[in-house]
Image (tube, rainbow, N blue to C red):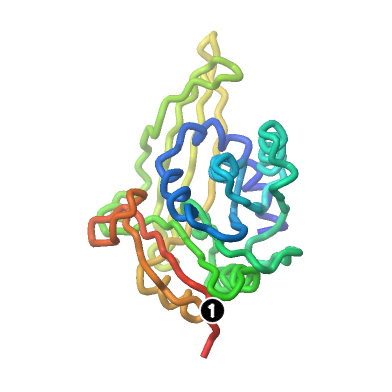
Amino acid sequence: MMGETDSIFDDIARHYDLLYEDREDDLAMWLELTAELEGDALEVGCGTGRVMLPLLQHDRRVTGLDISQVALRTARARLKAGGFTAVAALHLADMRDFDLPQKNFAFAFIPINTFMHCQTLADQQATLNCIYNHLQPGGRLVIDLYHPDPQTLLEADGRLLLENQIVDDLTGRTVHWFVVRRLRLDQQVQEVTFILDEIADDGTIRRDTLLFPLRYLHRFEMELLLKSVGFQLEDILGDYDLSPFQAESPRMIFIAKKVSIA
């Protein structure tokens, strides 16, 4: 979301690789879902290239867009280092309002919870409309979302949790990553705070705090959104192992196809 909030995403991007560089649990799924793809893929919210780069390494053709210039700077460096600049494109854009030269993508996807940055119904519909307009007839969209089961929602009560302890390869220092989640039930929003404490050799601590809201969605709410834009739901997966969605699933991974609105 360009404007006031794009600085939030730049702040997140500055720490993203430190926090998520080793995350690979969803990569096999994206490779499987694009295994027989005939055409180009569009990644909405490509960030620093965590998913995009492995897809390119496996001969997929991928265009990425992101709102963060900081994230795209890292992604461009990675594409250049991998020799992919001639076969991949990156665009600085708001996912709610973008107009790319290419309008015939065969596949579009929004990875881990990125769609939850849409804070209103209008934001959600605008994002889906933009993607719809960039897909060829029959093109597919996959959106990976957190499954908001009641127990995990109850745990968003402001408690401070240690998410991980990470050694920063650039500095050699340990970073303690804490997470606080607070629920605004009337808005279907979790306010998420990341607290990153970098411990220097002399024991002093440098703290960075990142605060951002995530609007969660429920299954049938998302189904209705997709249908209202012109997508036909094909499947809902419950996890990255491609298992079907059920009550205890940790994820809701929607697979939909572009069709004409009746």
Q: Does residue 207 appear to the left or right of 149 in the view shown?
A: right
Q: Position of residue 217 (x, y in %)?
A: 41, 65
Mark 1: give few (<14), some (14-19) or many (20+) Cα within 10 Å.
many
Check disc 1 and report its element: helix, strand or loop.
Answer: helix
Up-down: is 157 above or below 83?
Answer: below
Between 61 and 145, the one lying in front of the other is 61
Q: Nearer the viewer, residue 142 or 85?
A: 85
Q: Nearer the viewer, residue 18 or 254?
A: 254
Task: Please report the residue visible at 72 percent of the width from the left and 35 percent of the height from the top.
Answer: 80
Quarter holding the N terminus is bottom right
The kind of residue on which mark 1 rests is: Val
> Is residue 12 in view from this perspective?
no
Q: Is residue 86 left or right of residue 12?
A: right
Residue at the disc numbered 1:
229
Counting from the top left corner in percent of width and height, residue 166 is at 46, 24
From the top left corner, tell me how far across and down residue 216 is, in percent: 42, 61
Q: In the figure, residue 176 lies in which quadrant?
A: top left
Residue drawn 70% across the image and 65% down it:
98
In this rendering, the count of numbered labels is 1
